[in-house]
Amino acid sequence: NLVPRKLGYDFTPPSYSISSLDRDEVLDFTGVYTTYVIEGKITFQGNPLPNVTVNLNGSQSGSTVTDSSGNFTFTVPKYGDYTVRPTLSGYIFAPQQLTFNNVTSNLRADFAAREGFAIGGQILRNGYPV
């Protein structure tokens, strides 16, 4: 079976079956591109939190900033894998990030913020990460 694949696309027909390849074949597929929305809201003590940077990583990357109502939106290709992570100095978010695999519908990614700072770094041994 020959099955076409491309991020965001569904094809008609979904596959071709070739029983014997004894000559050149021309196989045509028609692709339809589909996107979905990952949207969410970020709150602090139940109130909208504006100006939070929200990063998208995975099959597509990008970033946006929450509006005055704490809302954000990403438009992503169907079938992708994505991780959404908010960041704003002086705040910690719960959850820290959300991951969505094989996206086939619109999705919500809501986060609650609290005041605080994260500690980051790495452990080295002889100059190399452990």
Image: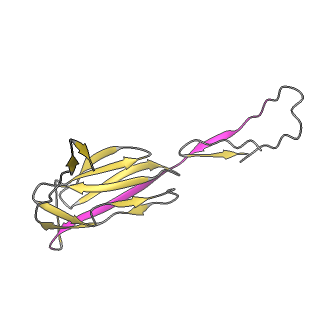
Q: Residue at x 18, y 51 (%)?
A: 121
**Closer to the camera in the image, 116 or 42:** 116
Residue found at the far top of this picture: 24
Q: Is residue 52 left or right of residue 9?
A: left
**Closer to the camera in the image, 113 or 67:** 113
**Closer to the camera in the image, 124 or 77:** 124
Q: How many marks?
A: 0
Task: Residue 30 in the image: state x and y as whole percent.
Answer: 68, 39
Quadrant in which residue 2 is drawn: top right
Which colour style is shown? Answer: secondary structure
For residue 77, above or below residue 24: below
| Screen quadrant of the N terminus | top right
Task: Residue 109 in the image: state x and y as whole percent.
Answer: 34, 63
Please check the rendered image and state whether residue 68 is part of the magenta-colored stretch, yes or no: no
Please check the rendered image and state whether residue 29 is part of the magenta-colored stretch, yes or no: yes
For residue 128, above or below residue 120: above
Q: Is residue 125 left or right of residue 14?
A: left
Q: Which residues are magenta?
A: 26-45
Residue found at the far bottom of this picture: 46
